[in-house]
Image (cartoon, grey):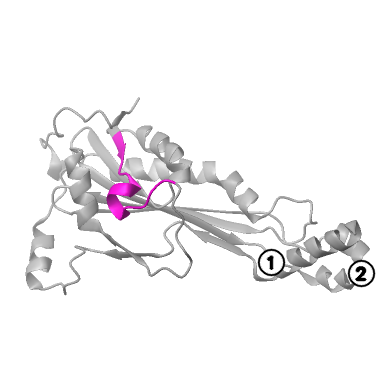
Amino acid sequence: MRTAALLGVLLLSVATGCGGSMYQASSGVKLEVDGNGREIDDADVAKAFEASPQLGEKSRVAYYTFDDAHADDITKTIAAVPNVASVYQIPTLLVSGKRKFQETPSYAPPQELSIKKLRLLAARAHADVLVVFDHGYRGGGVNGWVALNVLLVPMLFTPWLSNETESYAQAHVIDVRNGYVYGEVATEEKSGSGAVTIYAPNVADVADQQWPKLLDGVKVKLGEKLRPRPEAAGVASSDTPREAMVAAP
């Protein structure tokens, strides 16, 4: 009985491993500029051209992440960026209405997410800059050793799996007041091996190991984006921060 159960687990591993693994925090989300569903016209383009950088010596940052499980890490990373005065996480409940333990069915239609709505929520927290944070990973699969898996014993000891993993972190940086786009911050990591046994870390474990390096890369590049610019000199940051904001060190 135990042998049959073990064989079942291993066969499940083969079926799962053949296709690899992929995770994207923003999957199932459709981003829109204004959320009104209307077409962009010449007036929208002209207004975008009028926008200019408004970064002061210190900026209050509001951010939205598609994955609340990593929110604490993201908050600490942004708070450690030079020129950041405080950090506020925009709650998922206010954006999509999704509760803490609510599960989203795989067959559910894409959730529409408006950048304009995120800017409004950031403005209500008196933030200067909006950061939209996304991350994900992909990897795994099998290699040539899998041909020996017709026998049970080789399956237990041969390196027929791959845990090579590519992961990324992205942060889109936008001015809350006028929608000026300061740019995109992106970092990537790749590690793992193309030949490991069933006892090696899986793709999700390797991605967890890469996560701190991704955050370090985001911190450095975000610092470059939030550095005050000459054309924005003299622009003061907003007044006293809200209680929900986390003061940067």
| Figure check: 32 above or below 239 | below
Crowd rating for badge 1 (residues with CA inside 10 Å; few <14, some 14–19, many 20+)? some
- Residue 242 in the image, given as x and y percentages of width and height: 22, 30
Question: Which residue is pictured at 79% across the width and 51% down the height?
Answer: 199
Question: Which residue is pictured at 21% across the width and 46% down the height?
Answer: 121
- Residue 54 in the image, given as x and y percentages of width and height: 15, 44
Q: Would you say 136 lies left or right of 115 here?
A: right
| Displayed quadrant of residue 129 | top left
Task: Tell me, yes or no, whether the highlighted magenta stretch contains residue 93.
Answer: yes
The extreme top residue here reads 249
Label 1 sits on residue: 16
Say which quadrant the C terminus sits in.
Answer: top left
Q: Is mark 1 on a helix, strand or loop?
A: helix
Residue type at mark 1: give it. Thr
Q: Which mark is residue 232?
A: none
| Displayed quadrant of residue 180 | bottom left
Q: Is mark 2 on a helix, strand or loop?
A: loop
What's the magenta region? 87-100
Say which quadrant the N terminus sits in.
Answer: bottom right
Please state the total of marks drawn on the protein image.
Answer: 2
| Figure check: 87 above or below 201 | above
Question: Which residue is pictured at 66% across the width and 62% down the height?
Answer: 140
- Residue 35 in the image, given as x and y percentages of width and height: 21, 64
- Return the residue nearer the eye: 246 or 98: 98
Can the viewer see residue 158 in this picture? no
Crowd rating for badge 2 (residues with CA inside 10 Å; few <14, some 14–19, many 20+)? few
Q: Residue 151 carries which label?
A: 2
Residue type at mark 2: give it. Leu
- Residue 28 in the image, given as x and y percentages of width and height: 41, 65
Give the CA distance from mark 1 to mark 2.
18 Å
